[in-house]
Image (spheres, rainbow, N blue to C red):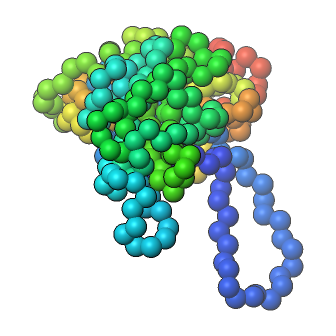
Amino acid sequence: MDERPPEDQPPKPEEAGVIGEIEPQQPDSTPPETPEEPRARRRRPWTVGCLLALLGALAGGGIAILLSRGAAPPGDAGAPIAPGPETVNSLVFSPTPERPPVTPDIIPAETDVIYGFYELGRVPAGAELSGKWSHEGQPLGDLPLDEHQPESGPPFASGRFTLRPPPGAENGFTPGIYEVELTAVAYPEVVVQGSFVALPRAAAILQGGGEPGGPPAIQSLRLAQDVTDAGEPVGESTVFAADSDRIHAIFSFEGIMPGSVVMVRWYFGEQELTHARAEIPLVAEQGWGEAWLDPGDGSNLPEGDYLVSVHLGDEQEPLASMGFLVTSAAGAAATASPGDD
């Protein structure tokens, strides 16, 4: 639900280059192949926190992203292109038709409509708008400004539109992070960006609160093929097939100050899969949470040893960690359990 657009690149190592000085030609060398990082969700920074791999319930956890920027057009300094103040640029979302001050931490994925509220201070009222949106870094195309209702009061562009689940989505919005970019056709230099997080069981996620009664602790950390609405693992194991759709990490916590962020990290061998890192803000001092590892694009997870760890914020020492194996051995994931040798 970090003041920046999320960075979602395919989970593979970046190559650094040097531009400027011409170096003597070196013999060709081919670096050894390394497994491509499985893709989960992208990490998104902001003041409350972000979810990149969170899909499901966090009893007392939520995430939100709110990005907003206005770009002044090139040209003569101080030459306005619209009557409104340059600083009035915002894009927020809500499951209800009333404009909220900020986008809620979590919007229920089960809803069939989400309202978008915009302000473009340097764009005249009534200007034609356009935009685009994406889900988990995957473009969804042009922004459908359904039921667009411009606001008549301000001298600049302001109003409301609705978003409905994209084609193919079932039971509301597909859970995950949605990013939206809005501009005006005649003023493409002015852009406002925003995002929201849709999760199932949002009401349960946002329950609770209060001060912690003890030190921060992870009471349990389990791995499974799926998870129920009550936070119970389905197909619990420490061995998973390489063609698994997702590997879920389910943890229960206590003693964590509401507003704190729990970070879930995934490792393949000694290498952290940074694109799978999940930042989960919590609004209660105890509850349960979930993150997952997803190979993406129908590909398989590389075979080998993995580890998942749960941290309080940016602390390097984990509150809990657990290793697991990914293998193509037939039936291994179906029969293994945490108690198996």
Q: Quadrant of residue 165?
A: top right
Residue 278 vertical position relative to residue 97 in the rendered view, above or below: below
Q: Quadrant of residue 282?
A: top left
* Residue 104, position as x, y percentages in the image: 32, 29
Identify which residue is drawn at 52% across, 14% down: 172
Q: Is residue 161 left or right of residue 270?
A: left
Quarter in which the C terminus is drawn:
top right
Residue 334 in view here: yes
* Residue 45, position as x, y percentages in the image: 41, 48
Identify which residue is drawn at 70% across, 88% down: 21
Residue 216 vertical position relative to residue 111 in the rendered view, above or below: below
Q: Is residue 139 left or right of residue 213?
A: right
Out of 61 and 27, give the one closest to the viewer: 61
Out of 189 and 301, give the one closest to the viewer: 189
Identify which residue is drawn at 21% across, 33% down: 258
* Residue 199, position as x, y percentages in the image: 44, 22
Give the farthest residue toward the right: 27
Residue 313 in view here: no
- Labels in figure, total: 0
Q: Quadrant of residue 159?
A: top left
Residue 317 vertical position relative to residue 331 in the rendered view, above or below: below
Identify which residue is drawn at 41% across, 47% down: 124
Residue 312 vertical position relative to residue 337 in the rendered view, above or below: below
* Residue 290, position as x, y percentages in the image: 43, 26
Out of 201 and 152, give the one closest to the viewer: 152
Quarter in which the N terminus is drawn:
top left
